[in-house]
Amino acid sequence: MNQTKFSHVMPIWKFCTLYIFTWGIYQLPWAHKQWQFIKEREHLNIRPWFRSWFLPFYLYSLCQKVFALAEEQGYRVKASPFQVTFFYWIFVVLTKLPEPWWLISFFSFIPLLTVVKALNYYWGQQQQHLPINESFTGREISWIIFGVVLWLLIIIGFLSEGEI
């Protein structure tokens, strides 16, 4: 069996798709993967899963580390960890809006795109010889299936809300 090794670059469309299909839950494994990489690279004594579960509190630190890595590779975009974290938190707070306005919080992935782009630049420089995986992996397909089931349950909940 031919097993091609792919770059760690994650196409923006793929990140958005996984984030949207899972109602943002995909940010947990995504953040874990980033923190695990940073832990191994910098020999840190941290718990990646803990930091991913509490991403809003650790996002600033993640941004600092990711943007520094990208800049070391020649990344010219001057991204602000504060701005990414600030706008992410705005979306988190928007979950408290009344129906249907809380759905705006669904776009909390938008500030994270700055981090994904910086990571993509870093990995693009580090793994130039590897192809980018433009299709979904088995694990990503599992996340999409989970997300579809979640969406169906949410839609059923919305539709049955008036019937109770």
Image: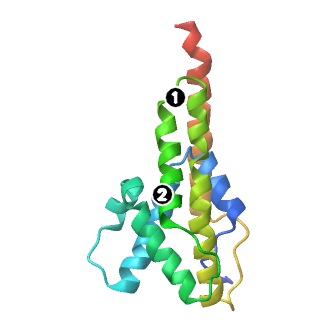
Direction top: furthest residue: 164
Disc 2 marks a residue whose amino acid type is Thr
Residue identified by numbered label 1: 97
Up-down: is 160 above or below 134? Answer: above
| Mark positioned earlier in the residue sequence (1 or 2) | 2
Please report the residue visible at 40 percent of the width from the left and 68 percent of the height from the top.
61
Q: Kindly indicate whether the residue at mark 2 contacts the one at mark 1 (C-beta within 8 angstroms).
A: no
Q: Quadrant of residue 45?
A: bottom left
Residue 138 shown left or right of residue 45 in the figure? right
Q: Position of residue 39 (x, y in %)?
A: 36, 78
Q: Circle 2 sits on which residue?
A: 85
Q: Nearer the viewer, residue 60 or 13?
A: 60
Q: Secondary structure at mark 1?
A: loop
> What kind of element bears circle 2?
helix
Badge 2, how many Cα within 10 Å: few under 14, some, many 20+? Answer: many
Q: Quadrant of the N terminus?
A: bottom right
Give the amino acid at mark 1. Leu
